[in-house]
Image (cartoon, rainbow, N blue to C red):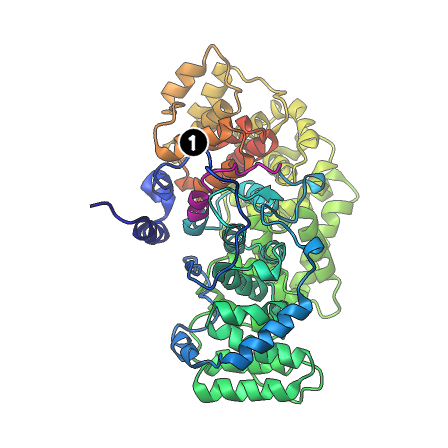
Amino acid sequence: MQVPRTYWLAGLSALALAIPVLAQGGPESLLPEGFGEPAPAPSAPRSQPTPTPSPPATPAPAAPGPTPTTAAALNEAAAALPGGASNAAEGDEIAEKYDLPPSARRSLDLIGPLTPDLGGLDAGAFGRDHGKDLAAIMRVTRAPFLSRWASILLRRALISQTETPRDIGGADWTADRAWLLLRMGEADNARLLVQSVDSDQYTRRLYAVAMQAHLAAADPAGLCPLLPRARDFTDEPGWFMAQAICASFSADQGTASALLNQAQRRGIARGIDYRLAEKTVGAGPNSRRSVKIEWDGVTNLTSWRFGLASATNVPIPAALYTTVGPQVRAWEARAPLLTRTQRSPGVAVATRLGVFSGIASRDFYAELADEEDADDAVTARGELLRTAYTGASAAERIGAMRQWWTGASADGWWAGPGDVHYGNLPALARAAAVLPATEAAGADTPWLIAAMLSGGYDNQAARWSAVVNRLDGAARERSWALLATGLPSPQIGLTGDRIGSFVSQDESEGKQLGRSLVAALAGLGRLPASDRAQLLRDNGIETAPRTRWQRALMAAAQRREAGTVALLAAVGMQGSNWRALPPQHLYFIVAALDRAGLNPYARMVAAEAMARIG
């Protein structure tokens, strides 16, 4: 008997969330049957999808990650919410008042805020077929990802103004893109994406994701324009509580108080969830509510709790962040009402994940150190950063950079090879890029090059090609590998003997760094032709795609679907430990990016591997 597709996808989702993909030896299980195969031509022109209150599934929480909105028990109480004819009529009046005229409506066929002239991918980046399959992959993919550069590329793809595939509605397609962005830590971009759809085109799924996006961005006020129709699509308790919050923000404190009292009486919200809503209502104009928030007995952090606490500047106990994924710390990094000191752990995570650029990270730490109430440790670290950029000599600047990149991460993340915290490097990218290339940098050279490449300064890194061969030991080898993979064109010797020498000197477990170098160079097309077959064979790298993931990835690259390639490449880099990334995976990821016209990203991912495997 054939298993219905909906049950098959549900089982797929549960499996993908339970088992780290890299531990399975490949992300094949994420790909629906038939993905990557040509779809039959449509028999009729595509019609504009119309939202209906019937049921696409609401997004399952990422594992680990914040649970949707409020406790599951609140869903039962939501069944008693009022929804008679008078409420429906009132909603229709509000909707009619604020509806856009036809000339101002936005098409669901082309959605995304990042247009090509702003750096977005081309409109056909995800192709015109297999939208449902791509959405299914987005839903079960575990984020964040190993590679900072892979995450940066996927963010660019997900927020680009791209065509909606033919087999999925534009609102649901937007919802799945935004839901993945949230799990990547991209709260602001997820909110921006859901706002790309007119509110009268929302579906049940997009309403669910929109609530998550606005809470992750610490923006409960953003829910207010969605309220009139949201009540017709979902009985989620958060939308009832949002009515009270939005009434307060409109200075209608009488209605806000009545709704809060109703929620408390009916058990729609209890405990910390109710108190945070009450606190948010108290932030409205003319409100006289003063609410003290205590976290005693709270055992987990949800998006509802994060969003309302961050929106009202209520400190969240550090222990609660251990109950969610690192993406929630990245949400914290951009919460506008939190102090810089409160946001510091989040900025460390956001920089490591690629949510923050190196420049944004550098500016944050400089401003943090200049605050009047900054403690001695923060001030000293700020002084290190200042010296890294403005020290009197190259040696002084390099010394400050070394102390910076070996300093413990604010979120307690572990160090990588050379006791270097890779997440600390992007803030130094520009400082490293303006240094004169000198062999006096010695053992610091690979990390100076890695810092430059973490910020995309590949041409500046190329200047160090002249000094690499004058270095010794591990510093020479890793610096050479970074330049061999990261530069726009190789400016160092890439002979078979030199590559073989690197592999033989590699002391990492299973010679993973050396084998990964061979895989990356093969993906970039940089192995010498005469030695290519031997190097691949000696290091166990097969270039013929054999798994479904490999075939789908390379087929998407051949079609030049940059968005699909970005997604499938990220699928192959789920997890948090670079040592779990097989060199075979790295080959196909780098090769697909290169063939899809994304060579700069292919090189940066390859160079990042050379900095982080060891």
**What amino acid type is highlighted by mark number 1?**
Pro
- Quick one: 379 or 91, which is closer to the camera? 91
Q: Secondary structure at mark 1?
A: loop
Quadrant in the picture for residue 579? top left
Q: Is residue 294 visible?
A: no
Q: For this view, does 232 lie left or right of residue 13?
A: right
Residue under the image location 36 percent in, 36 percent down: 34
Q: For this view, does 350 lie left or right of residue 431?
A: left
Residue under the image location 52 percent in, 34 percent down: 610
Where's residue 249, x and y in %? 67, 78
Magenta span of residues = 122-137
Q: For this view, does 37 lie left or right of residue 426?
A: left
Where's residue 144, x and y in %? 49, 50
Quadrant in the picture for residue 197? bottom right
Q: For this view, does 559 lie left or right of residue 547?
A: right
Q: Residue furthest front?
A: 44
Q: How many labels, in total?
A: 1
Q: Is residue 168 visible?
A: yes
Where's residue 449, x and y in %? 63, 35
Where's residue 201, x and y in %? 57, 58
Q: Which residue is mark 1?
A: 38
Question: How many C-alpha atoms fall within 10 Å of the one at disc 1: few (<14), some, or many (≥20)?
Answer: few
- Quick one: 255 or 532, which is closer to the camera? 255
Inspect the magenta stretch and tell me whether residue 133 lies in it: yes
Q: Residue furthest top?
A: 530
Is 201 situated above or below 9? Answer: below
Inspect the magenta stretch and tell me whether residue 373 lies in it: no
Is 62 situated above or below 318? Answer: above
